[in-house]
Amino acid sequence: MLRGLMNLFSLCWKPFGPDGENHETNGVLGGGGGTTGGSREGKDRLLWFRDIGKYGSGEFSMAVVQANQVLEDQSQIESGQFGTFVGIYDGHGGPEAARYVCDHLFSNFRAITAESHGVVTAETIQRAFRQTEEGFTTLVSELLGSRPNMATVGTCCLVGVIYQQTLFIASLGDSRVVLGKKVGNTGGMAAMQLSTEHNANIEAIRHELKELHPNDPQIVVLKHGVWRVKGIIQVSRSIGDLYMKHAQYNREPINAKFRLPEPMNMPLLSANPTIISHPLHPSDSFLIFASDGLWEHLSNEKAVDIVHSHPRAVRFCPYFSVHQS
């Protein structure tokens, strides 16, 4: 059981509205005990919040400011007596990929973990991502004739799993998780980024892409001041975006603006997540999981300062927080 692991953890994502879904359910890793009872909900124009609900190890609250007219993002928290699973799925090109991941990634993870006798490892998480990508690929193949746009939708994924005093982080794309860590007895708080971002605007990612595609001088292109893979998409890893992964999805009937002028000999994007494990320490105070929409406006340090300074008023900020009871 999770006990004494952390006082607060927070997640943020961009828009939330009537077309989006947020899941808070019981039974992570086969356990039970999560609940959202006792929470208060409210909405003020584009601001939506839930103030204090229960989860496996304490309480959570959330608040979201809707930023876009069409919602393409999903999020979830799944909690039980043996662990907690958090997911943020920042969709692009349409909502279908993020919805599919929200509906299938956790269930795949739970089934794979059950096969491993309830033990969570980086490999079980990676298998869940791989199975979800394969399932979405099958769905796109079945619908390609009637809905060719399905080949051009995708989603970033940021997942956190807390299991036996260890935090696992798995990421595809450019969402980010930042740890707020107490600095000795000073009362101060340090910001520590735990996730790796896969965005062509990062020099290391451009270098990685060039090493993977040494014979393609156009693998990354600077377009209107923004680096993009093939001049099309900023992220280098995602679930979906099959038009950038398999040649059979980069031709008619998909829209011409997504079709590459030269043959695709190997996938240009990857669905292989970067996974890290972090042993939780008493000085680990909270986490902030957020899509790129938050980090475009806040530094890691500023976000940590906001949560640290206003831990009981987070419902007025665009994130979702979980408190240890």
Image: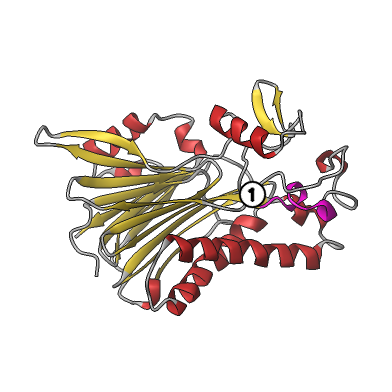
Image quadrant holding the N terminus, namely: bottom left
Furthest-left residue in view?
185
Main secondary-structure element of the magenta-colored stretch = helix
Q: Quadrant of the C terminus?
A: bottom left
Residue at horizontal 31%, vertical 69%?
Answer: 37
What colour scheme was applied to this rendering of the protein? secondary structure
Q: Is residue 161 above or below residue 228?
A: below
Residue sitting at 66 percent across and 67 percent down?
135
Q: Residue at x 22, y 36 (%)?
A: 309
Q: Give whichever of 288, 314 is nearer the camera.
A: 288
| Residue 134 x %, y % | 66, 65
Q: Which residues are magenta?
A: 240-249
Q: Is residue 61 left or right of residue 188?
A: right
Residue 295 spot, x, y in % from top left: 45, 34
Q: Is residue 247 magenta?
A: yes
Which residue in the structure is indicated by mark 1?
270
Whether residue 45 can be seen here: no
Find residue 68 and report its image quarter: top right
From the top left corner, tell me how far across and down residue 164 is, in percent.
Answer: 27, 65
Mark 1 is surrounded, within 10 Å at the Cα level, by few (under 14), some (14 to 19) or many (20 or more) other residues, namely: some
Residue 169 can be seen in this image: yes
Amino acid marked by disc 1? Ser
Q: Name which residue lies at 41% across and 30% down.
A: 298
Asked if residue 252 lies left or right of residue 33, the reply is right
Q: Quadrant of residue 263?
A: top right
Q: Is residue 304 above or below residue 325?
A: above
Task: Out of 263 and 149, give the one closest to the viewer.
Answer: 263
